[in-house]
């Protein structure tokens, strides 16, 4: 799970282009195999189409314009597929949920990325932390994200990532969220977790991702990829 990419300056949510290249190259030379979101969806729909044992799905949250500027050239050069999770209320705007001014991808840019083989998927409508919301509010947000994606003509895959990794703690709210996702056709939902997903995939609305931070060392990245959550 990546967010922003910058040519020089790393941070908690930002990796440099050198770090991104280093991470991808390490995975490619260490027996890991990058897969597309469609491959993951296919493995769920048709169990006979199993994922490779050391499959890696590369994802970017929020849809920052710097993904297009700095990450996509590296992905194309190294022939690596990726998925961008898009908060539909902020397409073409900035990351106001962080009180930030980072530009987000426009409708035209997102469509261009899709045509270039980058998958697009849902990341709530208003970048809400579902941990803090009622089931009714979550349902409305999920429905609105679909309405807006359709209005903009974005070819969204039936997958979702939780903003902040948050899911409702109340069982009734969580059940309503899952029922809404199923009704809207969402097949997969990704949390953070920092754990390795066993294959075949189990709870499809609780898939783990490794949180990659530019502020962490390469050695820590390697340990996370191998072992998952660090003590």
Image (cartoon, rainbow, N blue to C red):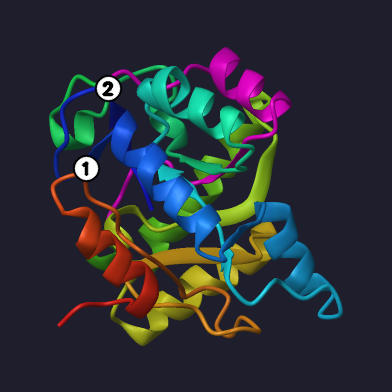
Give the magenta-colored segment's residue range. Answer: 103-130
Near mark 1 (Cα within 10 A), the count class, few <14, some 14-19 or many ≥20, is some
State left or right for residue 152 relative to residue 140.
Answer: right
Above or below, 97 against 219 in this view is: above
Is 112 part of what is drawn in magenta?
Answer: yes
In the visual, does 112 lie left or right of 163? right
Q: Is residue 195 above or below residue 159?
A: below
CB under 8 Å between discs 2 and 1 = no
Q: Is residue 124 visible?
A: no
Give the image quarter of residue 6.
top left
Residue 45, picture quadrant: bottom right
Q: Residue at x 49, y 29 (%)?
A: 74
Q: Which residue is mark 1?
A: 13
Would residue 20 be counted in the magenta stretch?
Answer: no
- Choose the circle earlier in sequence order: 2 or 1: 2
- Asked whether 116 or 190 is in front, the reply is 116
Q: Residue at x 14, y 39 (%)?
A: 11
Name the residue at 48% across, 57% down.
Answer: 27
Q: Secondary structure at mark 2?
A: loop
State the residue position of label 2. 7
- Residue 103, visible in the rendered structure: yes
SS class of the residue under badge 1?
loop
Measure the alpha-carbon separation of dots 2 and 1. Answer: 14 Å
């Amino acid at each position: 799970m990546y967010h922003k990419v910058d040519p020089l300056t790393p941070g908690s949510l930002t990796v440099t282009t050198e770090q991104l290249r280093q991470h991808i190259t390490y995975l490619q030379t260490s027996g890991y195999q990058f897969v597309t979101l469609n491959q993951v969806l296919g493995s769920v729909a048709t169990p006979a189409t199993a994922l490779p044992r050391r499959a890696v799905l590369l994802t970017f949250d929020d849809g920052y314009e710097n993904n297009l500027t700095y990450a996509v050239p590296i992905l194309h050069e190294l022939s690596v597929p990726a998925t961008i999770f898009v908060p539909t209320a902020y397409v073409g705007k900035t990351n106001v949920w962080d009180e930030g001014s980072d530009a987000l991808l426009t409708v035209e840019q997102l469509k261009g990325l899709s045509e270039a083989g980058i998958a697009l998927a849902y990341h709530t409508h208003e970048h809400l932390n579902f941990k803090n919301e009622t089931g009714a509010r979550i349902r409305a947000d999920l429905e609105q994200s679909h309405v807006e994606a359709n209005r903009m003509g974005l070819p969204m895959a039936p997958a979702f990532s939780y903003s902040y990794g948050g899911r409702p703690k109340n069982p009734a709210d969580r059940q309503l969220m899952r029922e809404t996702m199923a009704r809207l056709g969402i097949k997969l939902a990704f949390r953070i977790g920092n754990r390795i997903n066993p294959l075949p995939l189990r709870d499809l609305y609780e898939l783990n991702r490794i949180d990659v931070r530019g502020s962490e060392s390469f050695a820590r990245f390697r340990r996370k990829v191998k072992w998952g959550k660090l003590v």
